[in-house]
Image: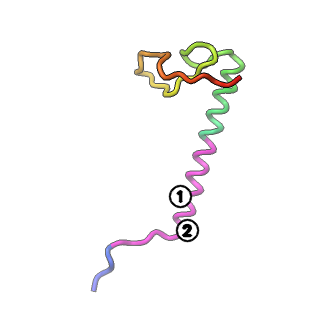
Amino acid sequence: MGSSGKTRTTFAKLNRESKLRDKRAEKEARKTARKLDAAGASGSFGDGPEGFYPASPDPDDVTSGAGAVELPR
């Protein structure tokens, strides 16, 4: 007879994928923190008014202030 058709993922692979997801999330957090730190040093970030951070920085978006979120000081 043939195999069951559906192969199972081993715990080793699941652990590797989990570690990779965690590593990528930490890297993204560091990247965001660097951007916010640089924005604090210069006084503003992006095209929005001072103290605002665009929720979704889309280069094709022509509405620079729409969807902005105020940063805590």
Q: What's the amino acid at mark 2? A: Ala
- Which disc is residue 6 wearing? none
Badge 1 amino acid: Glu
The picture places residue 45, in percent across and down from the top left corner, at: 61, 19
Label 1 secondary element: helix
Q: Residues within 10 Å of mark 1 (few under 14, many from 20)?
A: few
Dot 2 or dot 1: first in sequence order is 2
User: Residue at the spot x=64%, y=24% of the render?
Assistant: 71
In this view, the residue farthest toward the left is: 1
Image vertical order of residue 70 relative to residue 18, above or below: above
User: Residue at horizontal 66%, vertical 21%?
Assistant: 39
Viewer-proximal residue among 49 and 35: 49
> What residue is rendered at 56% in x and 57% in y?
18
In the displayed structure image, the side of residue 4 where residue 14 appears, left or right: right
Q: Quadrant of residue 8?
A: bottom left
Read off the residue under disc 1: 17
Identity of the residue drawn at 63% across and 39% down:
29
Quadrant housing residue 25: top right
Q: Is residue 26 magenta?
A: yes
Q: What whole-number distance in Å separates the C-alpha atoms at marks 2 and 1?
A: 9 Å
Image quarter of the N terminus = bottom left
